[in-house]
Image (tube, helix red, strand yellow):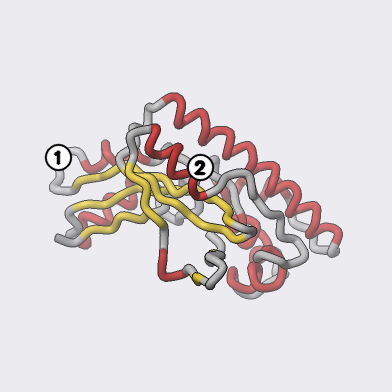
């Protein structure tokens, strides 16, 4: 059985709406998918409704961004009720932190004489979880970089001049939060992590 349990939609930094994701999954013959957007469950219900009547199971999921010893680590949470008020409220707090972080990155870029408009970054996020990928798209749109990867490598990647850390949640806290919501925590993209003797973790930006 073919599945994809780590899919982003326009609810965060994906390119397809939840409904479009379901259509593509059906075309590919997948039997199960998980909508796992950054810090939001808002795309889950739409995807589940779109899959109704088809042989495709849509699992609820979320990808929570955390930090460990200064390095970014993403934790997936599966099978969380998208209507769990306590968990949704916590995700809304994360959304506020994302907006604040984006505002600071735009300000740092302006100090480098790189002028992108915050409103345009939010437009690119299309009402979903705003983050560095949307800042990168704005930089690409204005011609400051030639690729999205260049935006991270030159400006908004960890340690770069316009980078703003988001260190308010640890992996352990994220796991506890997911378990409290009766979810299943899983480490995201472990192949991107580098473990050192000091147990420090590093991962690519998400």
Question: Relative to residue 171, is residue 24 drawn left or right?
Answer: left
Number of other residues with Cα within 10 Å of mark 2, as a class: few under 14, some 14 to 19, many 20 or more: few
Judge whether residue 45 can be spotted in this image. Answer: no
Using the rendered view, name the quadrant where residue 177 is placed.
top left
Distance (Cα) linking label 2 and label 1: 37 Å
Q: For the residues labelled 2 and 1, say whether their Cβ atoms are less than 8 Å apart.
A: no
Q: Which of 201 and 38 is in front in this view?
A: 201
Q: In this figure, which residue is indicated by the disc labeled 1?
A: 53
Mark 2 secondary-structure assignment: helix
Residue at position x 53%, y 65% in the image: 199
Q: In this figure, which residue is indicated by the disc labeled 2?
A: 173
Number of other residues with Cα within 10 Å of mark 1, as a class: few under 14, some 14 to 19, many 20 or more: few
Question: Relative to residue 150, is residue 7 drawn left or right?
Answer: left
Q: Name the mark on residue 150.
A: none
| Name of the residue lying farthest toward the front | 197
Residue at position x 41%, y 58% in the image: 188
Residue at position x 50%, y 70% in the image: 195
Mark 1 secondary-structure assignment: loop
Question: Relative to residue 86, is residue 70 drawn left or right?
Answer: right
**69 up-or-down from 101: above or below:** below
């Amino acid at each position: 059985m073919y599945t994809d349990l780590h899919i982003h939609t326009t609810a965060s930094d994906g390119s397809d709406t939840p409904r479009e994701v379901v259509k593509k999954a059906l075309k590919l013959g997948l039997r199960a998918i998980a909508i796992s957007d950054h810090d939001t469950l808002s795309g889950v219900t739409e995807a589940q409704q779109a899959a109704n009547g088809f042989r495709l199971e849509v699992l609820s999921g979320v990808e929570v961004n955390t930090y460990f010893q200064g390095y970014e680590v993403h934790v997936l949470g599966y099978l969380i009720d998208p209507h769990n008020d306590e968990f949704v409220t916590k995700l809304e707090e994360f959304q506020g932190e994302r907006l604040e972080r984006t505002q600071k990155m735009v300000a740092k870029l302006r100090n480098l004489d790189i002028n992108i408009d915050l409103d345009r970054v939010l437009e690119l996020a299309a009402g979903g979880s705003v983050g560095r990928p949307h800042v990168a798209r704005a930089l690409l749109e204005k011609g400051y970089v030639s690729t999205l990867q260049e935006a991270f490598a030159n400006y908004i990647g960890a340690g770069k001049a316009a980078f703003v850390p988001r260190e308010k949640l640890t992996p352990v806290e994220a796991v506890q939060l997911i378990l409290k919501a009766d979810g299943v925590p899983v480490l995201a993209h472990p192949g991107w992590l580098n473990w050192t003797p000091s147990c420090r973790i590093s991962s690519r930006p998400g």
